[in-house]
Amino acid sequence: MRIAFGCDHGGYPLREPILARLKADGHTIVDCGAYTFDPEDDYPDFTFAAGEAVQRGDAERAIVVCGSAVGAAIAANKLKGIRASIAHDTYSAHQGVEHDNMNVLALGARVIGVEVALELVEAFLHANFSGAERHKRRVAKVEQMENK
């Protein structure tokens, strides 16, 4: 799977472990930075780049990481067609995809550790949208809201 990845300084500690796992699992990475630690960088810049990669079709999904995941999730959801959520438990990581067709996972490096982050990435990437009528109906309603 093609995965866009973006993180700011707050998410930087999870950058290498997540990218290493994605590579080891055979995923193609669209690396949207940050490429170096800079305490002055801003999460919207990297979230926007990762979200745009999904919008363009350069990536099927994205993972964005900041300190809490809150800012990254808010920023990602400003982009048309992006359905992002914070997931700090495996149920939310897979259920968000299965029921809500979530295409961007937001993680908080100051909230979770490396092992939990890797479990969440696995749950997110191995999940598939159910296609159940009730789930399609709900996602369509969200898309209608987005288009107003």
Image (cartoon, helix red, strand yellow):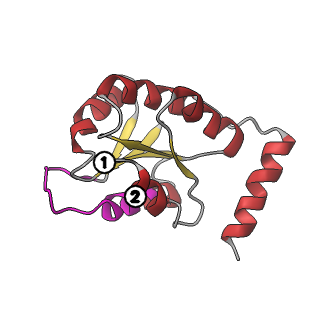
Count residues near mark 2 (Cα–Cα under 10 Å), then give few for <14, some for 14-19, many for 20+.
some
Q: Is residue 49 magenta?
A: yes
Of the numbered discs in the image, which one, if any, rests on residue 67? 1
**Residue 97 locus on image (x, y percent):** 62, 39
Q: Nearer the viewer, residue 67 or 125?
A: 67
- Quarter of image, res 16: top left
Say whether residue 21 is left or right of residue 88: left
Question: What residue is drawn where x is 21% and y is 38%?
Answer: 13
**Residue 20 locus on image (x, y percent):** 27, 29
Separation of disc 2 and disc 1 at Cα? Answer: 8 Å
Q: Nearer the viewer, residue 73 or 17?
A: 73
Amino acid carrying label 2: it is: Gly
Find out whether the residues at labels 2 and 1 contact each other: C-beta distance under 8 Å: yes
Amino acid carrying label 1: it is: Gly
Q: Secondary structure under badge 1?
A: loop
Question: What residue is drawn where x is 43% and y is 42%?
Answer: 3
